[in-house]
Every structure is written in C-alpha cells, then in structure tokens.
Amino acid sequence: MVIQGAPLGTGHVAIIMVHGRNASPEKILTLVPELATPRITFIAPAAEGGSWYPKGFMAPTAENEPGITNGIASVHACIDEALAAGIPSERIVLLGFSQGACLAGTAAVQRAAHYGGIVMYSGGLIGPVGTKWPTNGDFARTPVFLGCSDVDAHIPAGRVRESATHFEAMNADVTMRLYKGMGHLVGEDELDWTRAVLRTLGA
C-alpha cells in the first residue's frame, strides 16, 4: 500500500483509495489535491498487475476469483492498518473509482460498520445478476455516495440503483446520482459531495 498526507497515526481521518482497472495507487492518488487537508491520511492498496480481477464486475464470480477475494482482503487490511493506528471506523472513508469503487463497496458490505463514508465513483456492488449480498450488518447511518453516468459503458445504471437500495437496507444514509452523459470519470459534483462529508468529519 502507498500512504500519503498526514503520517499514519497522526491524521484525524483516513481515506482508503482503491484504484481502477489497469491503474495503480499513484493514479487514484491524483485525487489527493482535490481532497487533502493536513489532517487526512490517504492509504492506497495496489492490485497485482494493475487490476483487481480479470472480467467485468458482473461476470460469474468464479471467473473473477481469486481476484475478488484477494482484493477485498487488501481493502480490509487497509482498514485494519488505520484502526491499528488509532483511527476509529467512523473516521475511515472508503473511496474507489470504477473497478476500485466496485471493490471498495463490496468490501464494505462484507464488513459493515459505522464508517466516515463510502464513496463509489462509477461503480456498483460486485456479482452477476441475482447476487444476494450480505445483509447481516449495520452501517449506522454511514454516508454512502454512488455517482455514475446514466450511460456508462462499464456500469449499468440498474446495478447502481440496486446497490444503493442494498446499502439503504443495511441502514446507510445513501446519496445516488446518475449524471446525464457524463462518461466514465469523476465529476466536480462528486468531489463536492466528498468534500462536504470530510468537513463533517472535521477533516
């Protein structure tokens, strides 16, 4: 993992930033100038070979293993790193883009807690049509954001809606926004939402 910002253990908030397909921690960390304050530690795990899993996020699960399992374990390891440094879960934000957003959100569902926030830029929960994700957890009104183009070539709008509904069922405070013709990218409105959540955390 790559760590930037406030040294781990001194920061007030930790943001775990999960990169997309064919990318790297350095790529997702290009967002740091948009979000950074002296009180934030940024933790970015790295996928072997640059991708967390080989197929699309809605492919049969077996075709994406062991990538999904290993990727979720990487996200959970970052959470554990922040907790061990004295940052409580309610000041840990999980954030990802594209494949990283899918992984961050799915990792959160598998380990539900009161987080500082869950931010999914152009992503949805992982699994083929008909997947039943875990429901035996409580997000305790964690603010969750799902933002995506309404015509994203990689992320069907229906899966974004389905993912939002699942987070709501697990007691998250969900904001979902589908942007008309935005493309597969991170928009300014999405960054504004993220900054607002960080302000509520005192970051």
Image (cartoon, rainbow, N blue to C red):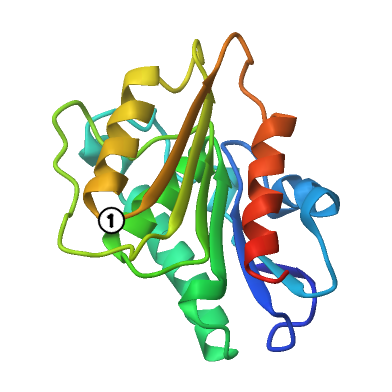
Side of 164 relative to 40 (left or right): left
- Which x, y percent locates residue 61? 23, 39
Confirm whether residue 165 shows in the render.
Answer: yes
The residue depicted at 71 percent of the width and 41 percent of the height is 192
Residue labelled with disc 1: 171
Side of 63 relative to 33 (left or right): left
In the depicted structure, whether residue 189 falls above or below residue 158? below
* Residue 90 or residue 24, whichever sits in front: 90
Image quadrant of residue 165?
A: top left
In the depicted structure, whether residue 43 falls above or below residue 169? below
Confirm whether residue 44 shows in the render.
Answer: no
- Mark 1 element type: loop
In the depicted structure, whether residue 100 falls above or below residue 198? above
The residue depicted at 62 percent of the width and 56 percent of the height is 197
Figure disc tally: 1
Quarter occupied by the C terminus: bottom right
Side of 154 relative to 166 (left or right): right
Side of 65 relative to 191 (left or right): left
Image quadrant of residue 81?
A: bottom right
- Which x, y percent locates residue 70? 39, 59
In the depicted structure, whether residue 88 falls above or below residue 33? below
The residue depicted at 56 percent of the width and 80 percent of the height is 82
- Which x, y percent locates residue 140? 33, 66
User: Which amino acid does the dot numbered 1 rest on?
Assistant: Asn
The residue depicted at 79 percent of the width and 54 percent of the height is 32
- Which x, y percent locates residue 128? 22, 30
Quarter occupied by the N terminus: bottom right
Q: Residues within 10 Å of mark 1 (few under 14, many from 20)?
A: some
